[in-house]
Image: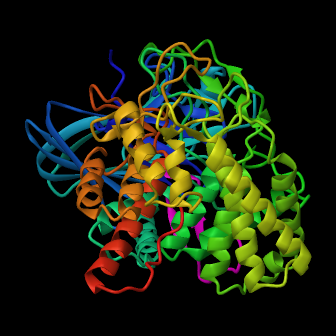
Amino acid sequence: MTDRPIEDYAVIGDTCTTALVARDGSIDWLCWPCHDSPAVFLRLLDEDKGGACEILLDEVRETRRAYRPGTTILETLFVTATGTLRLTDFMPLHPLAEVPDEGPDGAPHGRIVRIAACEAGTVSGRFRVRPTFDYARDGAALEPEAGGTVLCRRLAKPEGVRVAATVPLTIVGDRVEAAFALQAGEGASLVLAHREDDDGDVGSAAASLAATESYWHEWSGRCTYDGPHRESVLRSALVLKLLTHAPSGGIIAASTTSLPEAVPGTRNFDYRYVWMRDASFTVTAFVNLGYVREAAEFLRFLREADGTRGRDLKLMYGINGRVPEEEILDHLRGWRGVGPVRIGNAASGQHQYDIYGEFLVALHAFLDAVDYDPPVRVNDHLAEVLGHLTDHVIRCRHAPDHGIWELRDETRQILHTKGMLWVALDRAVQIAQEVDVAPRERVEEWRRVAAEIRADYHEKGWNARIGAYTQAYGSDDLDAAVLRTVLFGAFEPDSPRVAATLEAVSAGLGDGDLIYRYRNADGFEHPEATFAACAFWRVGCLALAGRMEEAEPLFARLLARGNDLGLFAEEIDAGTGEQRGNVPQGFTHMAIINHAVRLDRAARHRDAQTDEPCRWAVGA
């Protein structure tokens, strides 16, 4: 197969969309202008039909790459038979003269800039641009323009990509090419522009690079984590920032669609939407690093996306509206031939009641971070939102659902959901203790129902024959999601039953350091790979149980599972070590952040030799 390994990809972006850059410098995935827009480059999902923006060099011998520290600016060093070339890739995102209280904190330009600089000897090659609009369902007309640019115009709609370069452009069939022959100290730049009024302005590439670097340095400089894993934590934070959509405040789950979770298999889904659960996870990670504004921006997104103030909270949202119906693009063969390629997501219609707990954890963390003095637009409707969310919890406490794993067969009385319903009411009570959001009798009702829910799942979730808390009431199936409930306080981490469950999950779902979500039938034919975040949950449970001598080295080994840039997809194949699923995956990077913070606080608490309770990180 010619398709590159998933771990070969780097990500660049501008907080509106992202692009994936392969190790050989080929941009194989780009949705423009937004994360969930139709793909312009999608060789990631079809080597033949999908377009790309390539750099083709003569006689390449070696390739190395790295991000500029504290940025999302990618540098790839190519050593050829005759010289050395450095390729710098970025999407311009310039600082604002003044950052507003709400809205984007930078100015995206809707461009990709590629700067090739010969550093030694001589290097020859060419850029090659082949857009395939609307997931390769629409053609492109290539039109030379005055000034030397080329407009790649979509046939069916008024959309296009303008190509500009510091070297002459030529049209070769359905491609635009820019050949260069460089000596040491010389360079060639290529600019792709999406906006119709953008002429490419390739002459400003160097200034744009400096401005973009300034934006990212300022943003990275506000990270409050200074523990032993700062590089991995900051890289994960930068990934999460790239998964935000600055104009709306939304946070998507991952940059891609349909990268398979199982090979062979059909577990291919579209993650370019705003999941309440995943976005709430990300909010807690941002708060743990001091990025409170990003958390507030997600609340802005919800305020605008959900006019019901929590009464009709959805499982997921599109960036600019509802999630489209799930559709299979059967003209695309999929990554390495593993289909189907899906856009949209059918899970948007499921019942997943744990989202109330997920969101209230994030809301509580945000309010705590701002000392319970939120912006007026949050505070004005806080009581109403809290009332609606707790009403949901009380109403659905006995109902089965599809759960965190979005099981596509029958609904169940899922233990993780029940634990997160308790978490929802617990955090609502904590908020009410700090701000006047509900009458005393209402808060007492939350306490009472929370206690009933907790007693219920402690009794019905325990399976004496298995010797563990299991996936659902009456089930023999193990579920790594039970570990998450421990991290949120739904179970006591040092209880014998939790210890037994941790051992059962490690033995029954573990493969070395890695953990499967579950192993029971779920309506799909082939089993998936291990789920990266689950392995980090085990780290958290070990730390909470005081087993730091196990937790710390396990965490370090898991970090080493990322690619050479510290990026993670959703899953890891236990047999090959290859990454699986959509990439980069916010779920995984959020877990890295929260557990690095958790371990750091636990280590400081241990070293201080104090009897004071440890202030744990929120999130999982």
Q: Range of the magenta residues?
A: 91-113
Is residue 55 rendered to the left or right of residue 388?
left
Q: Is residue 464 depicted above or below 301 in this figure?
A: above
Q: Position of residue 283 (x, y in %)?
A: 60, 64
Whether 452 is among the magenta residues is no
Q: In x, y percent, where is residue 45?
A: 49, 24
Q: In percent of the image, x 41 and y 67: which residue is there?
A: 598
Q: Quadrant of residue 207?
A: bottom left
Q: In this view, does 313 lie to the left or right of 35?
A: right
Q: In which quarter of the image is residue 210?
A: bottom left
Q: Is residue 129 above or below residue 120?
A: above
| Relative depth, front residue between 527 and 568 | 527
Dominant secondary structure (helix, strand or loop) of the stretch shown in magenta: loop
Instruction: Provide residue 398's location: percent of width, then percent of height.
Output: 80, 43
Q: Identify the image quadrant of residue 48.
A: top left
The quadrant of the picture occupied by the N terminus is top left
Between 535 and 6, the residue placed more toward the observer is: 535
